[in-house]
Image (cartoon, rainbow, N blue to C red):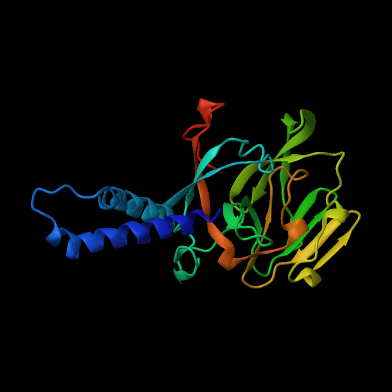
Amino acid sequence: MNFPLIMFLLLVATGAIWLLDQFALRRYRAPQAKEPWWVEYPKSFFPVILIVFLLRSFLVEPFKIPSGSMLPTLLVGDFILVNKFTYGIRLPIVNLKLFEVNQPERGEVMVFRYPENPSLDYIKRVVGLPGDRISYRNKRLSINGAEVRITPDGEYNYIESGLNYVITQRAMERLDSRIHAILINPDVPAVQLGGVRQFPFRENCAYNDNGFSCTVPRGHYFLMGDNRDSSSDSRYWGFVPEENIVGKAFLIWWNFGDFRRIGNSIN
């Protein structure tokens, strides 16, 4: 469902009725006559829809985390807020950037339109910037030839969909100045080669049984989930074009199952 498009159509419809009544219909009504329902309701909803549309389009937008691909940073059921202007002001619906604000940085958690189906929003962590050489072999990430430092941090166990109990190793990873937790399952290969698809700039990547290496093309980004062995990400479906960026995730604003998560910033 394309919610921004639905909001835009509602805004146009209610705004048109408000304008029609303001400049035409009201002059033909008796001074004390009640507005017909088909005028009263759209006029009442128009300012509300306008405010919501502007907030969601240019300031912040709420999202719900549907899967465990970003564990332990984000839990299934977390409601998060996404900063819509930090990477540039964009026209809603068409997502055309009007002017630049900041560029994505390694380690930031980004919401973007899934390249294979732009009607879906995905959330992952920025690992590679345009021009970076990304390598992930034997569960160790390297960027431009330098291995990313990780520190073991015990075990992390969780229940996957279908009541499957998963035992993983937790580690703290540093991407530039940002430190965050990741999960590694030693029983799962670095890349499941059967899941790798054909995608634009696939020739920039080389895969084998130990993992992969890719050069990020200009105007694109490489993203991975923090739950490294349970994440559908750039390893499988490729690079994220700049025009697919939605915004930067920055806050957990609600979780029905754990009120302690409310108000936590997203690192």
In the image, what residue occupies the spot 74% across and 60% down?
A: 237
Q: Is residue 233 above or below residue 132?
A: above
In this view, the residue farthest toward the left is 31
Image quadrant assignment for residue 218: bottom right
Nearer to me, 106 or 160 = 160
Number of dots carrying numbers: 0
Say whether residue 249 is left or right of residue 233: left
Q: Is residue 129 above or below residue 56?
A: below
Say whether residue 160 is left or right of residue 57: right
In this view, the residue farthest toward the right is 209
Q: Is residue 17 above or below residue 228?
A: below
Q: In the rendering, at what x and y percent does residue 158 appear?
A: 72, 29
Q: In the rendering, at what x and y percent does residue 4 appear?
A: 47, 56
Image quadrant assignment for residue 13: bottom left
| Quadrant position of the C terminus in the picture | top right
In the image, what residue occupies the spot 50% across and 40% down?
A: 265
Q: Is residue 241 above or below residue 211?
A: below
In the image, what residue occupies the spot 53% across and 56% down?
A: 2
Q: Is residue 124 visible?
A: yes
Q: In the rendering, at what x and y percent does residue 211 appear?
A: 85, 55
In the image, what residue occupies the spot 52% across and 53% down?
A: 248
Q: Is residue 146 visible?
A: no
Q: In the rendering, at what x and y percent does residue 242 appear?
A: 58, 67
Say whether residue 119 is left or right of residue 183: left
